[in-house]
Image (cartoon, helix red, strand yellow):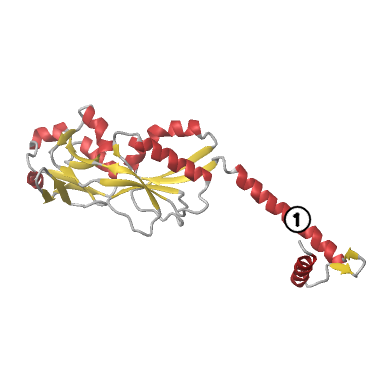
Amino acid sequence: MSRAMVSRYLAAMEDWAGARLLHRSTRHMSVSPAGEEALTRCRALIGVAAGISGRAAETATPQGEIRVAMPGALADAVFLPMLRDFSDRYPRVSIDLQVTDRLVDLVQDRIDVSLRITSALDRAIIARRLGGVGSVLCAAPALLSRIGQPETPEALADRPCISYAQLGGKTWTLSGPDRTVRVEVAGPLQTNEAYLLLRAALEGIGIVILPAFAAAPHIANGNLVHLLRSWKPAELSLYALYASRRNLPATTRAFLDFVAGKIGGSALFRSG
């Protein structure tokens, strides 16, 4: 650094401090009392800065608590079975799991990552698509023995159906080989909690549309029957929502990458 540059920096520092920091002449230079005090304080500031930098380096290894929100059906069928692998890989990370079907406010609710199943998101939301979520129409065998299996989508209007308030409500849209049908359904229950759809279906309360990942094990063991196989409800997507792309904590990034990897390798989800 040139002498002229040093002089300019020193003048700026003295203006900032409001005092002469150095006594100087053409032959000598010494630190003034105000300069001694400023030097002590600046060394303390450097120490604080170094501590922050060191802490940032430490947190490059995923550690601490991460607060995650997701629907109960997703937590039960998908997330909990993968949690042990996550804990084995990141033993210094703990998860505070908030189970909810509503769209959370990431900042107000202090949520690091929200997993959400939906057909569309607001463009202002920062999200990572993890995969496609297929849905199936199904019911308990005991219910079907009483009401008979519907042979067409239109027949659903005369059967007891359980609707999901968050997606479509009592208007069901099904796509078949050559047409798409919208059916107005009715029944004893509508709920805003996806997990209750599954429970109600298993209890034989009505016909439901369930995410394939939630229905698959119950269809496999015979507790639910897959109906109208050639007719498909609209496909949804699973997204991970987070507050900011900048300075994403290592723990949050590790969680996102882990879940994306697990879901990307699952037959229950289509490619993200």
Instruction: Give the position of the C terminus as an image quadrant.
Output: top left
From the top left corner, tell me how far across and down residue 3 is, in percent: 80, 65
Tell me what residue is drawn at x 73 percent, y 52 percent: 47
Q: Left or right of 69: which side holds 63?
A: right
Q: Work out whether 79 lies above or below 53.
A: above
- Residue lying at the far right of the rendered structure: 27
Q: Which residue is mark 1?
A: 44
Instruction: Give the position of the N terminus as an image quadrant.
Output: bottom right
- Of 205 and 20, nearer the camera is 20
Q: Work out whether 224 lies above or below 41.
A: above
Q: Left or right of 72: which side holds 55?
A: right
- Residue lying at the far top of the rendered structure: 221
Residue 73 occupies quadrant? top left
Secondary structure at badge 1 equals: helix
Q: Left or right of 123: which side holds 88?
A: right
From the top left corner, tell me how far across and down residue 144 is, in percent: 11, 35
